[in-house]
Image: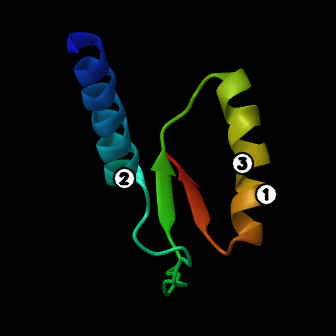
Amino acid sequence: MKKLLSIVASLLALVLVLTACSSKTSEKKEEKKENKTIKVAAHISPMTDMLELIKEDLQKKKDTLLKL
């Protein structure tokens, strides 16, 4: 009897956790996207090279990257 009760309690807990973690709406609403400006300080060459690559991707999203 205790084994059956513990299995039922475990299943109930699992169902509650999965229900709590699920999304309430299946469709995401499109939010108004604002242009963002991201400020980054980088002085070492590997980091500045990475920022140049990121800058190209951000320009596609119409965001800007400022290196300080």
| Place of residue 5 in the rendered image (x, y in percent of width and height, measured from the top left) | 23, 23
Q: Quadrant of residue 56?
A: bottom right
Residues packed near mark 2 inside 10 Å, few (<14), some (14 to 19) or many (20 plus): few
Query: Mark 3 highlights which residue?
Result: 54
Q: Is 54 above or below relative to 6?
A: below
Identity, as a three-letter code, of the amino acid under mark 3 = Ile
Which image quadrant: the N terminus?
A: top left
Q: Is 52 above or below relative to 60?
A: above
In terms of sequence position, does the residue under pointer 2 or pointer 1 come before the other?
2
Residues packed near mark 1 inside 10 Å, few (<14), some (14 to 19) or many (20 plus): some
Considering depth in this image, is 56 or 7 the residue closer to the camera? Answer: 7
Residue at (46% x, 52% y) in the render: 39
Give the spatial CA distance, label 2 vs label 1. Answer: 40 Å
Name the secondary structure under disc 3.
helix
For this orientation, the residue located farthest to the front is: 1
| Place of residue 61 in the rendered image (x, y in percent of width and height, measured from the top left) | 69, 71
Query: Mark 2 highlights which residue?
Result: 19
Name the secondary structure under disc 1.
helix
Q: Quadrant of residue 26?
A: bottom right
- Which mark is nearer the camera, 3 or 2? 2
| Place of residue 37 in the rendered image (x, y in percent of width and height, measured from the top left) | 49, 65
Residue 56's disc number: 1
